[in-house]
Image: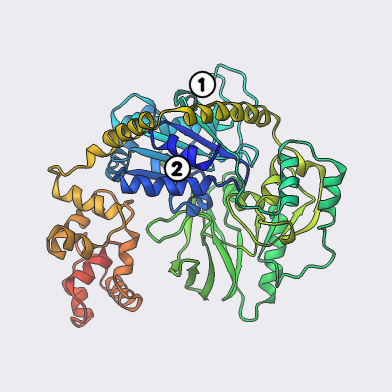
């Protein structure tokens, strides 16, 4: 199916699964659709299964968007609790289209959890509360990490995997299959043939010989921008070697822990932050935890610009300077913390695992497939490259060519369904297709025509759209003080609301001076008063400036 045909189907409001080989333009198609939705004033939730994939789409993880976090199961009480959070209610109620990228890495039971939360918030028992759902991914790529055995009390059918297409939610969506057949990432025919031979499970000696010719004896890291490895131990080795090349003082940050050794050990194994973090100014790093208020997610990359015993400052690829603080990973039981580890949420990132490379497009990479252990791993790693000339191999094993047998059978079925659907769309009368699209726009955008709303709710909507306080005040013809009152109200009622973008309203020096003054004054009678802070600062800044900083205390 072409992107043009798939876009026509998307515009009718049907639930859709967009799939196809790596480089077939899945992300490009979705971005075009998002632009069209914006033009039609249709509210869309842009999400992905992982933090890194979410950054590629300028979205957030589906776990954060829905409020389910990392839980494996939700009781009805927990679903009701999530649904009471004001920022989630406002976000989900107004969303008419939900997009989930890299859905192959999402567990089946988690899609069911998202469905349950959305139905609860929307008060609508249709799948996902009646919104259009667009799932994007390729099941020949990597499966969900950390699978578990299926609970026989929940699932009554025999399953071979926890791929998301086994979920009740997937089955209820009646998805239109759009299998993209064009190739955009790789124009190198020889390389495309190699990838297709892996995808069709027809790797012969000729293909293996071509790849073996890409095995290097000497490594020139000056011309190789990214290094991909199957296992963390290899990634750690390369990162430590690169760190040692940087001149300057090395700082070491140790993980802190409390609780029984067995529970602490479980946290240390599951936590992506290293127990011993070694840094130097100039080190390439990756964040390993989400903090939307501070502006990073799991997978955000950057460079350490300053580090000492007290402070770590990281500049992201977007140019944001983030002061990094320790974060906690905990095990809780009945609302009580049983064990906790604390560490700066960073790790070195000259080399990354193949799992974390999914969704990337690379001009050049050094790839080690000698330790491939997961089906789809070789295909994911190789298909990151735009051409065969950019491929540098340390080695490859036969496991690297393997794909999941179950996904292989589903893929053949999806290709057939997509072909039939494509033919049906192409034979449709243009006026009928146009009518279906206009009907969808009418249904999805009519809720957002001007109507009377609570003034604080209007401010919240604009905050969640990323507008700063001055922009909101100007558009609504209100004072900055009034908009600050609304923002303080929402922050008090829901401390987790994402208003990180407001930090950019003040210069870094101004922010630091006001922040320090608040720390000196401290909390007085349960509040953070403004007047003593103004006195400490000798009236250098406005009360509005102080109130903006206070939002983050």
Disc sitting over residue 62 in the figure: 2
Percent coordinates x, y for residue 58 in the rendering: 44, 54
Q: Is residue 70 visible?
A: no
Q: Are marks 2 and 1 in contact (CB under 8 Å)?
A: no
Q: Is residue 224 above or below residue 174?
A: below
- In the rendered image, residue 90, in percent from the top left (x then y), is placed at 27, 43
Q: Nearer the viewer, residue 268 or 109?
A: 109
Q: From the image, which quarter does the C terminus lie in? A: bottom left
Q: Quadrant of residue 545?
A: bottom left
Residue at image coords 17%, 50%: 456
Give left or right: position of 483 versus 275. Answer: left
Which residue is most to the top? 156
Q: Nearer the viewer, mark 2 or mark 1?
A: 2
**Front residue of this view, candidates 513 and 162:** 162
x and y percentages locating residue 320 in the rendered image: 43, 68
Numbered disc 2: secondary structure: helix
Q: CA distance from mark 2 to mark 1?
A: 22 Å
Q: Which residue is mark 1?
A: 154
- Mark number for residue 390? none
Q: Is residue 168 visible?
A: yes
Q: Nearer the viewer, residue 7 or 42?
A: 7
Please state, as top left, top right, bottom left or bottom right, where the N terminus lies in the image. top right
Q: Horizontally, is 506 left or right of 147 in the view?
A: left
Query: Which residue is pictured at 81% across the width and 52% down the height?
Result: 211
């Amino acid at each position: 199916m072409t992107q043009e045909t798939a876009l026509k189907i998307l515009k009718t409001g049907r639930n859709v699964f967009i799939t196809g080989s790596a480089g077939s333009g899945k992300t490009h198609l979705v971005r075009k659709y998002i632009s069209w939705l914006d033009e039609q004033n249709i509210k869309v939730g842009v999400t992905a299964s992982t933090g890194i994939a979410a950054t590629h789409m300028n979205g957030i993880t589906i776990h954060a968007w829905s409020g389910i976090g990392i839980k494996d199961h939700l009781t009805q009480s927990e679903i009701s609790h999530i649904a009471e959070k004001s920022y989630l209610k406002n976000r989900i109620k107004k969303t008419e289209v939900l997009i989930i990228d890299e859905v192959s890495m999402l567990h089946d039971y988690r899609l069911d959890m998202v469905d349950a939360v959305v139905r609860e918030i929307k008060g609508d028992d249709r799948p996902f509360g009646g919104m259009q759902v667009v799932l994007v991914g390729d099941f020949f790529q990597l499966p969900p990490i950390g699978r578990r055995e299926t609970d026989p009390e929940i699932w009554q059918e025999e399953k071979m995997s926890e791929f998301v297409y086994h979920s009740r939610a997937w089955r209820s969506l009646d998805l239109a299959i759009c299998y993209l057949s064009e190739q955009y990432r790789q124009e190198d025919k020889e390389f495309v043939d190699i990838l297709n031979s892996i995808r069709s499970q027809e790797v012969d000696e000729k293909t293996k010989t071509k790849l073996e010719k890409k095995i290097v004896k000497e490594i020139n890291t000056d011309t190789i921008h990214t290094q991909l490895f199957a296992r963390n131990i290899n990634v750690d080795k390369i990162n430590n070697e690169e760190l040692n090349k940087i001149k300057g003082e090395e700082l070491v940050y140790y993980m802190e822990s409390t609780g029984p050794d067995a529970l602490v050990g479980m946290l240390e194994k599951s936590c992506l932050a290293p127990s011993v973090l070694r840094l130097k100014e100039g080190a390439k790093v990756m964040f390993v935890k989400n903090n939307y208020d501070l502006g990073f997610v799991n997978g955000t990359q950057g460079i350490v610009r300053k580090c000492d015993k007290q402070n770590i400052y990281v500049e992201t690829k977007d140019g944001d300077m983030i002061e990094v603080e320790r974060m906690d990973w905990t095990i809780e039981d009945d609302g009580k913390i049983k064990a906790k580890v604390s560490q700066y949420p960073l790790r070195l990132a000259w080399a990354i695992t193949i799992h974390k490379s999914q969704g990337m497009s690379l001009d050049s990479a050094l790839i080690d497939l000698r330790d491939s252990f997961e089906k789809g791993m070789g295909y994911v790693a190789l298909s990151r490259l735009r051409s065969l000339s950019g491929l540098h191999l340390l080695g490859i094993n036969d496991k690297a060519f393997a794909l999941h047998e179950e996904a292989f059978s589903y893929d053949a079925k999806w290709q057939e369904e997509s072909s039939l659907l494509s033919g049906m769309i192409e034979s449709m009368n243009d006026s009928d297709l146009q009518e279906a699209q206009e009907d969808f726009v009418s249904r999805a955008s009519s809720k957002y025509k001007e109507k009377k709303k609570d003034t604080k709710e209007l401010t919240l909507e604009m905050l969640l759209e990323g507008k700063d306080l001055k922009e909101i005040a100007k558009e609504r013809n209100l004072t900055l003080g009034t908009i600050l009152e609304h923002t303080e109200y929402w922050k008090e009622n829901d401390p987790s609301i994402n208003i990180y973008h407001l930090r950019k309203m003040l210069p870094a020096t101004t922010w630091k001076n006001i922040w320090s003054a608040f720390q000196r004054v401290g909390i007085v009678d349960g509040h953070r008063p403004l007047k003593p802070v103004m006195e400490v600062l000798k009236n250098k800044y406005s009360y509005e400036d102080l109130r903006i900083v206070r939002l983050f205390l």
